[in-house]
Amino acid sequence: MPLRIPTLITHATMGLDTVELVIALEEAYRVELPREDLVRVRTVADLFDVIATRTGRGLVGRYAGPEWEDYRQRVSDELGVEIAKLAPMARFLQDLGID
């Protein structure tokens, strides 16, 4: 049986928190976040990297600086999670309890 790693969304479902977060980030960064990219997202850094790839700004893997802090603030505001909890390796499901 293959190992299943919990991701932000599955192929079939997205929780309301996740839908609202994705919509807010798409609007804020003026990008489309395709489901096929989102099904691999497990951590705060994973989602940042999807956005960074889609915006083409060369920020993949850069978890410091104004772009990272702006992203963390937007996620914090949308999810009501303390910004201090939004470390790169924080997992949306297990660590932050986001559905």
Image (tube, rainbow, N blue to C red):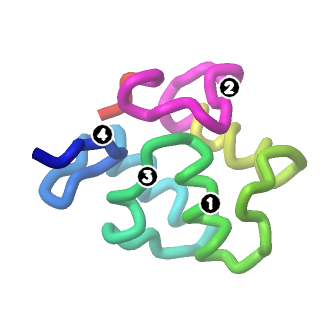
Q: Position of residue 17 (x, y in %)?
A: 34, 38
Q: Amino acid at mark 4?
A: Pro
Looking at the rendered image, the disc whose residue lies closer to the viewer, 4 or 1, is 4
Q: Amino acid at mark 2?
A: Ile
Q: Residue at x 52, y 25 (%)?
A: 80
What residue is pinned by disc 2?
83
Q: Please, is residue 78 above or below residue 96 in the view?
A: below
What residue is pinned by disc 1?
49
Answer few, some or many: residues within 10 Å of disc 1's Cα (few below 14, many 20 plus, some between 14 and 19).
some
Residue 88 on the magenta span:
yes
For the N terminus, give its image quadrant: top left
Q: Which mark is residue 12?
A: none
> Quadrant location of residue 8?
top left
Q: Amino acid at mark 1?
A: Asp
| Residue 16 appears left or right of 27 | left
Report, in whole angstroms, how far the alpha carbon at label 2 lies from the one at label 4.
22 Å
For the C terminus, give its image quadrant: top left
> Quadrant location of residue 57?
bottom right
What residue is pinned by disc 3?
41
**First-in-chain label (2 vs 4):** 4
> Quadrant location of residue 11?
bottom left
Answer few, some or many: residues within 10 Å of disc 2's Cα (few below 14, many 20 plus, some between 14 and 19).
some
Q: Give the residues in magenta.
A: 77-96
Callout 3: SS: loop
**First-in-chain label (4 vs 1):** 4
Residue 80 on the magenta span:
yes
